[in-house]
Amino acid sequence: MRTPILISLLAATAANAACAPQKGDRNITKFQLYPENIDVDTKSGLAYISVLYNSEVAVYDPAQGEVVDTIKFENLSFENPKKSRPDLHASGVQVDHLQRLSVSVNAGAAFDTQGTNTTGDNFLVKYGLKEKRELWRMNLTPVAEGFAGYQDIEHDSCGNSFVVGTFPGSIIRVNFNGTKATPWYLTEKRKSSTQGLTGLAVKDGMLFASDEVGGKLLRFDDMHAEKGVPVEVPIHGADGKTSIGKGLDGIYFPPLFEGKVLLVSNSMNGTVVLRSKDGTWKSAENLGLIHNPQTEPQHGGFTTASVQMGKRIYALTEYFADAAPPNKPVCGTLAGNRTVFPLQDITDLVTKLVT
């Protein structure tokens, strides 16, 4: 007998099945998307993708398989050649538990020059997904002089934001309402041209960061502490590996593995799979690399991030060389001439390594 409750449950199950991405690689079709990072709002199922060169955010609906909206930021996002900030890039995007979207809109010079030029503005922009408007923004440049390359973002249980900088490694903490920012962790005795921290991820109140120096994984046990105190997570692998590797970018805990698997984007090759069997992350196993075919020279792609949509896990690919010398941006724009951007379905490959 179909009671009203049963009918509601069946309807919800059917809706979830319809929204769940199907197995296999997929393409996102949007002119000049150039995605640097991606995160999913688990309440709506929508994915938010940073559009690197236009300093905006694309809203992607996995159920429809298309971009359904674009979020722009006044005086930061590209509008036209006369009204633009070519010095800025949008990189990190992260949805917090309050349905607020954090976006890093930062000076691209640090990345373009590998840290030799650390000048320029670095904004953390907070956008309300329920309000559908920008709530506030803060310029992080004055907070930690000499540090730059701000990109990935994470949040604690109070809604405070943690923004990671790469040249050299740093983490800035910004309070809930954007009225105060403080250096939470600064690496010492490193030149700005030394690439440091690249990505952030949170599990059970612990903050994790990937460090290009030594290919390390760092763990910060207390996100509520006044200053961050890093602990290096020992890494071992069956082939003798004691590090994550080189060319690191974003890191991500896919919900499918309940915090026991951490994916680390290797920009030049694909996705590194780390595992903590007991989920404590006192140590980690390097299970191996999942190759991204788009990183092969003929394609020119770089793996930048991972994301889970429904029950499928995808690797994101960026194409930095499209608008870099000797190539040029499309006339009147800030980016290259690409329209189709692939998402690599790595779910089965991750599962195979883990099991």
Image (cartoon, rainbow, N blue to C red):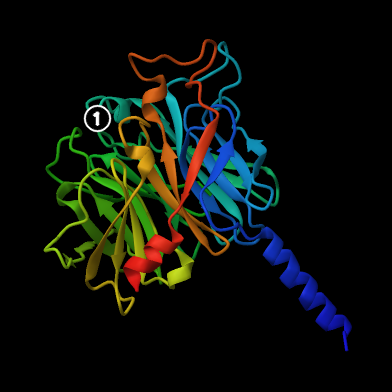
In the rendered image, which quarter is residue 88 located in?
Answer: top left
Number of numbered discs? 1
| Viewer can see residue 227 | yes
Residue, far bottom = 1
Foreground of the two, 279 or 265: 265
Position in image of residue 128 (x %, y %)? 64, 48
| Viewer can see residue 224 | no
The residue depicted at 25 percent of the width and 45 percent of the height is 169
Element on which disc 1 rests:
loop
Foreground of the two, 257 or 95: 257
Q: Which residue is mark 1?
A: 114
Q: Amino acid at mark 1?
A: Gln
Image height check: is 306 above or below 219? Answer: above
Question: In the picture, which quadrant includes the C terminus?
Answer: bottom left
Position in image of residue 74 (x %, y %)? 60, 28
* Residue 187 shown left or right of residue 97 in the figure: left
The residue depicted at 40 percent of the width and 67 percent of the height is 351
Image height check: is 265 above or below 42? Answer: above
Position in image of residue 199 (x %, y %)? 34, 50
Question: In the picture, which quadrant includes the N terminus?
Answer: bottom right
Position in image of residue 149 (x %, y %)? 32, 36
Q: Residues within 10 Å of mark 1 (few under 14, many from 20)?
A: some
Foreground of the two, 153 or 353: 353
